[in-house]
Image (tube, rainbow, N blue to C red):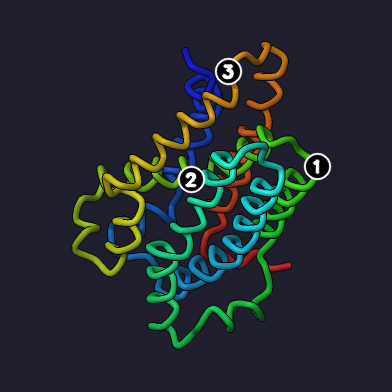
């Protein structure tokens, strides 16, 4: 078993719980409250700013040009497909990315972003990877599950969001990053793998809480 397969397995219970949250069920049915959905989009937009910062720190700590290029590749996705979808939903609500800047973070968002930045500042490149990967891989997992349970979601207002994370090219991106992580983790001892798995699990726990509070009123 490769390192990432084991690490993901160690957190799969959290991913499964995330895939079953009420917000995603309502989204899959196309019946999620529009105000709650907008709140999720806004908080996710805030989160993405810190996610980018974590990747930027990964680039800074990268040891080779290839490492830098891998971290940089994620920024392209955030700025292109994912960003276009977010901006479209914001525009429908009469908002822009500039408007997001003035919205308070929810407690869930603040906790998750604080974890990301703390790990990015103090952790090794491998620890940074374990902090950011559950978002990338976990989004693919929960939206695939959502699509499997409610295929009709592709005929709803939320189809663009689901499409972003269930498209073949997104799977290919996740596979490439998983392979990259496996290469970074080659040769590490049991204690090191266990430590990295704990970082990955904490990131997955933060992701779960974010989903549980998606659209909810948990502002500080």
| Residue extending furthest toward the right | 122
- Label 1 SS: helix
Earlier along the polypeptide chain: callout 2 or callout 3?
2
The residue lying toward the viewer, choosing from 110 and 74, is: 74
- Label 2 SS: helix
Label 1 to label 2: alpha-carbon separation = 21 Å
The residue lying toward the viewer, choosing from 124 and 99, is: 124
Residue under numbered circle 1: 122
The nearer-to-camera label among 2 and 3 is 3
Label 3 to label 1: alpha-carbon separation = 22 Å
Badge 2 crowding class, 10 Å Cα cut-off, few under 14, some 14 to 19, many 20 or more, is: some
Label annotation for residue 89: none
Q: Position of residue 142 (x, y in %)?
A: 40, 44
Earlier along the polypeptide chain: callout 1 or callout 2?
1
Residue under numbered circle 3: 186
| Residue extending furthest toward the bottom | 94
Q: Position of residue 164 (x, y in %)?
A: 34, 56
Residue under numbered circle 2: 136
Q: Position of residue 206 (x, y in %)?
A: 63, 45
- Label 3 SS: loop
- Check the picture and name the quadrant holding the C terminus: bottom right
């Amino acid at each position: 078993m490769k390192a990432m397969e084991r690490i993901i397995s160690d957190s799969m219970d959290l991913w499964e719980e995330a895939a079953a949250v009420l917000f995603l069920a309502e989204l899959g049915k196309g019946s999620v409250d529009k105000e709650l959905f907008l709140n999720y989009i806004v908080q996710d937009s805030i989160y993405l700013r810190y996610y980018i910062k974590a990747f930027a720190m990964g680039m800074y700590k990268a040891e080779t040009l290839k490492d830098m290029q891998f971290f940089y590749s994620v920024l392209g996705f955030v700025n292109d497909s994912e960003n276009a979808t977010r901006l479209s939903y914001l525009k429908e609500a009469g908002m822009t990315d500039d408007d997001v800047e003035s919205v308070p973070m929810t407690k869930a968002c603040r906790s998750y972003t604080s974890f990301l930045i703390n790990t990015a500042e103090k952790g090794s490149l491998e620890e940074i990877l374990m902090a950011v990967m559950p978002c990338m891989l976990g989004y693919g997992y929960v939206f695939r599950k959502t699509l499997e349970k409610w295929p009709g979601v592709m005929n709803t207002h939320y189809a663009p969001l689901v499409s972003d994370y269930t498209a073949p090219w997104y799977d290919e991106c996740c596979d490439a990053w998983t392979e990259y992580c496996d290469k970074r983790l080659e040769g590490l001892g049991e204690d090191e793998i266990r430590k990295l798995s704990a970082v990955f699990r904490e990131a997955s726990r933060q992701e779960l809480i974010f989903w549980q509070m998606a659209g909810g009123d948990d502002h500080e």
